[in-house]
Amino acid sequence: MAIRLIVKDPDPVLREQAITVTKFNANLHKLLNDMAETMYDAQGVGLAAPQIGISKRVIVVDIGDEQGLVEMVNPEIVHREGEQIGPEGCLSIPNINGDVKRAQLIKVKGFDRDGQAFEMEAEGYLARAFQHEIDHLNGVLFTDIAESVYDISDKPRQARGE
Ligand code: ZN
């Protein structure tokens, strides 16, 4: 495993439409391992492959709840319900937080590292993390859709990055 460099806005890779994964092989496993290690090292709660310069539809999420680490390849939100507004940050946009409106509950479909399809429901903060990471795969950053953004560089860290 290796910690990868996290690319920062305005790196153009963050604006690309990431490519669908078709090979569930050792390279993908290494990518997922490195993404988890990089996320934990940066104390993030989620990471999308474009954030380490790899334009592929791969995300990892771990908000520190009982769900633990979730790896998802080619994730797709198939159902959205309700809404929530709350603060977000991003490992690719240091020192900025913003209030973002998200669905309260989602159903997300994707594949595990071996190509097995699975579906899960996420609510609240976990749902927020998924929506944030899946946006990255479509070149969308939270600052694009935030109701307000604020500089937190001179304050103690309020929200962990995603
Ligand atoms: Zn992010």
Image: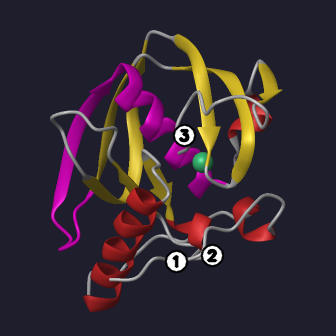
Graded by Cα atoms within 10 Å as few (under 14), some (14 to 19) or many (20 or more), the crowding at tag 3 reads many
Mark 3 and mark 2: span between their CA atoms? 17 Å
Q: Are marks 1 and 2 in contact (CB under 8 Å)?
A: yes
* Amino acid type for the residue under numbered disc 2: Gly
Secondary structure under tag 1 reads: loop
**Which label sits on residue 132?**
3
Count of picture labels: 3
* In-front residue for pair 51/38: 38
Give whichever of discs 3 and 1 has the lower sequence position.
Answer: 1
Q: Tell us which disc is closer to us: 3 or 1.
A: 1
Q: Residue at x 32, y 57 (%)?
A: 72
For label 2, the residue is: 53
Residue at 67%, 55% (x, y): give it: 92
**Span of residues in magenta:** 111-138
Report the disc number at residue 4: 1
Tell me if residue 22 is in the magenta stretch: no
C-alpha gap between disc 3 and disc 1: 20 Å
Q: Which amino acid type is shown beneath numbered disc 1?
A: Arg
Picture layout, residue 94 above or below residue 54? above
* Neighbour tally class for label 1: few under 14, some 14-19, many 20 plus, Cα within 10 Å: some
**Residue 77 image-quadrant placement:** top left
